Image (cartoon, rainbow, N blue to C red):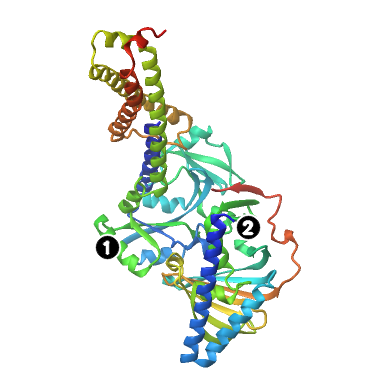
Amino acid sequence: MILTLVGISYGTLDEAARRARGVGADIVVRPPGTTLIAASASPMSEGLLPFFMKQPHVTFATGTMIQPLGGFDSLSGIDLDQFNKLSGGFRFVKGRGFQNDDDVIVDEYYAREKNLGVGSTIQLMNHTWRVSGIFESGKLARVCAKLDVLQALTGSPRKLSQIYLKVDDPPHAQSVVSDLRDKMPGYFIYTMDEFASLLTISSVGLLRNFIGVVIGIAVIVGFIVVSMAMYTAVLERTREIGILKALGASTGYILNLLFRETLLIAIIGTVLGIIMTYGTQWLMMHAVPASLTQETVYKWWPITGGISVAGALLGTIFPAWKAVKQDVIQALSYE
Amino acid sequence: MNSGSLSSGRCARSLFIRASLTVCAVVLCGIVTNTGWAQSTAEIFSRLDQTAGLFTGATASIRVITHTGIIDEDETQVGTLAVKRYPPNELRFLINFTGQDAQAIALGDRTVQIYYPKLNTVREYDIGKYRDLAQKLMLLGFGMPGRELAANYDVSNLGGERVQSQDSVHFQLTPRASDVLKQLSRVDLWISLKTNCPVQQKFYMPGGDYRLVTYSDVKVNPHLPASALDLPKAAKRERMN
């Protein structure tokens, strides 16, 4: 359970970072944190684009509008020609770019999850869209519509959520960012590397807390289950333990026996858990490829192994103590 | 009485004491530095204290200019505003923007709802703990006692001005809360001497951008049915968080 949830957290963020890098930009500009006053998710003016184009080393600027669709999904408004110049263009698996105002293009995972083909219609934001193309995943978003259409539908003409900049030489990106931060305090301006580094577990406070809670629950549940299992095992072996004690087995010998058995169960459980994560990974890849992405997070293998072994050993202490304290005669007469 | 009400009682007392001390400090500073304006501030704040308790709602025409400082660009939205007070002290509002960027924004109980007429959709965002902040910022000056202004902002009186053909007093407010200061470096507020409600608010963002909100045809305490703040019932509703 821990490995699956950690894998989903890492996978979802890494996928978002991969798509952000796939845009092909060197710098991303996000609006100041004043959405509460502006009551808008797209508060930046398109008029900023010519301003950015005039900045030293900046060779290209384009903007997008992002409309959340609930859950992990969002609809991105793009100017396809401008975006192709920035990213090198979408690679279409089927179909092509926008033909009409109500067209959307979707990535292959979204198409697979929603069972969409070229020409299919889909209802998003209470509006009917037609799929004109399916593109290879890894660029910006899973669903894209025409920018001006999305702006008009949401009553936000000439408004943008994010602006992407390309510089003449990537090493210049940091100096351009510093310069822009001085000129535009309050705006969130990052190099793409900085931006991608923000999409990590340690940077997303909510996910960090979520994983903490999951691990806490898993440890408690694991502790209780192992404890109950070992308690039952000791009860079932009351006669066996009595015979061992009658034959002269020491307390250390019996404890050693129980702890070794616990250790073996914990290790087998960990290995089985690791194998099962490949199963959930396969299931998600085929059932909900656009919504959930699960990664194999190798560094968590020893951590979960440690949690499993520690929980199991702690859970064995009480039944083991009870077992060695048992009277030999009572143990032998136990049915 | 539970610990929560004890704590909120203590909080309210502490807030009241702080507000009173601040008002006294403002008045005393004024007496020392500029007797004329200090008296005006004290008088206006006292009048706001009195009228705030009687405030049940307001309607107005609204014009919002969003200024992007770095490119010196203004974008204008026009519409109407309806504000209604719900007991004990909760303000709800509905702003209807018209024209090319038509949309409606409603602040309700814990939520902000945005209605997109072209999509016939209402998108609902739970703003939870930020609701109070949204109410205090977006409705700054509506039914707000002077002591509350003094408690939350460092207030400077910039004197009398005529805005929207109305005599008003221009206050410069600097937020005291650091989390608000991160989003707003300053607010200018023009309070009408006739209605004791704002005729203009100017929100300055840290980067040189600002949002200028002008109110005209302000009607204070009109009869507002509960449905006055409703968004179209037939619209599709989507919960966003």
* Amino acid residing under circle 2: Gly
Determine the secondary structure under disc 1.
helix
Question: In this image, A259 relative to A284: left or right?
Answer: left
- For residue B108, the mark is 2
User: What is the x, y in percent for residue B125?
Assistant: 56, 52
Chain of the residue under label 1: A
Q: Residue at x 64, y 48 (%)?
A: B237
Residue appearing at x 57%, y 41% in the figure: A130
- Using the image, tell me which numbered label, if any, was put on residue A152: none
Labels 2 and 1 touching (C-beta < 8 A): no
User: Taking A230 as reference, is B49 above or below it?
Assistant: below
| In the foreground, B202 or A206 | A206
| Label 2: how many Cα within 10 Å (few below 14, some 14–19, many 20+) | many
**Amino acid beneath label 1:** Ser
Q: Could you tell me how far apart the alpha carbons at marks 2 and 1 are, in whole angstroms?
A: 45 Å
Residue B84 picture location, percent across and down? 68, 65
Closer to us: A134 or B172: B172
Is there any visible trace of residue A157 in the rendered image?
A: no
Q: Name the residue under label 1.
A: A175
Please name the residue shown 72% across and 61% down the image. B228
Using the image, determine if residue A194 lies above or below residue B101: above
The count of marks equals: 2
Residue B225 percent across, percent down from the top left: 75, 62
> Which is in the foreground here, disc 2 or disc 1?
2
Position of the N terminus of chain B, as image quadrant, is bottom right
